[in-house]
Image: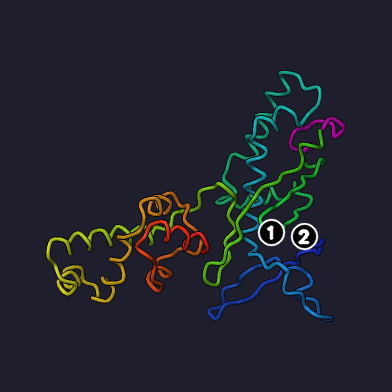
Amino acid sequence: GKVFDETGDRLTPSHTKTAKGRRLRYYVSHRLIRSTGPKDPSGWRLPGPELETLVGKLVATHLRTPAFRANIVTDVSTDELVAIDDRLLEATSKDPDVCDETRVALLTIVGRVDVVPGNIKIELLPNEITDILTVDQERITEENLNITSEFQHRKRGVETKLIIADEAGTRDETLFRNIALAHRYFEMIRKGKTYHEIAEAEGASKRRIQHLVELAFLAPDVIRDVFEGRQPAGMTSEWLVRHSFPPIWQEQREMFCAL
């Protein structure tokens, strides 16, 4: 009940099951699932774990910023400032991406989340901040309880990825490994090996070698982005193998930016 979209519509928890019985959780704009009246296709359908992790990361980052730690409490003494730092560092010591307990604790202090295209706004609850810092609520500066961040909302196959702006994502190890293989295969071709010979030596199909070797012609900065986990969410090995892309580097950049 804390998440709203740009129209003020509340996002309702929902779930589906895959053919294999895997349960997938979502936050869905109420107008998409209401039982009466027309359904508005402009509503949101966001993956629950992705949204919760993104919010947890933003809250943790905000609590760790020097500006927040220095200004969240009025008339703070030097000793209090040290204590505030210790309590905030303790509250954010574990990554909410991997620690369920930390993520739940951080989400507890969230009062409201507003999601609009390209932007997310989070309001923190002053009473929850008070409990963490053990100070009187009257001393909390409420202007420091608002968090705003840009984010990317990208489709990746049947999944949706939510990526905080300027944050490196998780490296796609499959894609990175296939790019390395592509350069290896291309070097073998330069030395006179045929696709058939490479396929036999590598224990792969000739068609697989032909598809992968195209990755050797990716622009250097595109490869760097893959290494750093900053490639577009839709840029996967599967997509690159199934779609042709231009050899001209600038044209590649323009194509991949749209993924």
Question: As shown in the figure, which amino acid type bears the numbered disc 2?
Answer: Glu
Mark 2 and mark 1 in contact (Cβ < 8 Å)?
yes
Q: Does the stretch in magenta take in 139?
A: yes
Left or right: 247 with respect to 203? right
In the image shown, does 207 or 36 lie closer to the viewer?
207
Q: Does the stretch in magenta take in 238?
A: no
The range drawn in magenta is 129-140
Question: Circle 1 sits in a helix, a strand or a loop, which is it?
Answer: loop
Q: Is residue 25 above or below residue 71?
A: below
Disc on res. 6: 2
Q: Is residue 21 above or below residue 65?
A: below
* Residue 71 horizontal/vertical position (percent): 74, 29
Q: Residues within 10 Å of mark 1 (few under 14, many from 20)?
A: few
Q: Which residue is denoted by mark 1 in the rendering?
A: 117
In the image shown, does 68 or 92 lie closer to the viewer?
68
Q: Quadrant of residue 237?
A: bottom left
